[in-house]
Amino acid sequence: MKSSGLSDMYMKIYETDANVMVAVCDKTIVGKTFREGELVLKLDECFYKGNEASDEEVKHAISCATVANIAGEKAIACAVDCGAIDPGTIIYIGGVPHAQMVQL
C-alpha cells in the first residue's frame, strides 16, 4: 500500500547512549486518555507529539529502535506490517490498540 504523502501519525524519537526509543501515535488520539477497567492509556502530547511521519518513516524508525511505544490503528498497522509487533501482543484500552516493543 502506497502512502498518499499525508501523515496520520506523530512520531518522536528519544536517543540515549544505549537505546533508541520511538513513540508513535495516531494524530486523532494524541492528547487523550482512554480507560478499560483498571488500565489507563494516557497519550500525552509531550511524549507522543513529535514530527508528522509517513508510514515508511514510522516503519523504518520502529525497525531501528530498541524500545517502542505505539498507539492507534494506523501506528499499530505500521508496526505489525514491518514485523516489529506480533498482532497477538496488542492490547485494547478503551477501544484503542496499544503495544510496546523491546529489542533485547
Image (spheres, rainbow, N blue to C red):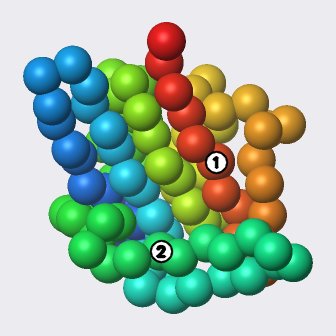
| Residue ranking furthest to the left | 17
* Residue that appears at 34% across and 66% down: 48
Between the residue at mark 2 and the residue at mark 1, the CA separation in whole angstroms equals 13 Å
| Residue ranking furthest to the bottom | 32
Q: Position of residue 101 (x, y in %)?
A: 55, 33
SS for dot 2:
loop
- In this rendering, the count of numbered labels is 2
Task: State the image quarter where residue 58 is shown.
Answer: top left
Residues at marks 2 and 1 touching, judged by CB atoms closer than 8 Å? no
User: Can residue 34 be spotted in the picture?
Assistant: yes
User: Can residue 56 be spotted in the picture?
Assistant: no
* Residue that appears at 41% across and 56% down: 24
In the rendered structure, the answer to whether residue 39 lies left or right of residue 17 reads right
Mark 2 closeness class: few <14, some 14–19, many ≥20 residues within 10 Å: many
- Does residue 84 lie above or below 27 as drawn? above
Per the image, the residue denoted by label 1 is 99
| Residue ranking furthest to the top | 104
Task: State the image quarter where residue 93 is shown.
Answer: bottom right
The numbered mark at residue 51 is: none
Mark 1 closeness class: few <14, some 14–19, many ≥20 residues within 10 Å: many
Q: Position of residue 43 (x, y in %)?
A: 47, 74
Kind of residue indicated by mark 1: Ala
Dot 2 or dot 1: first in sequence order is: 2
Per the image, the residue denoted by label 2 is 43
| Residue ranking furthest to the front | 38
* Residue that appears at 76% across and 47% down: 90
- Does residue 76 lie above or below 93 as drawn? above
In the rendered structure, the answer to whether residue 95 lies left or right of residue 1 reads right
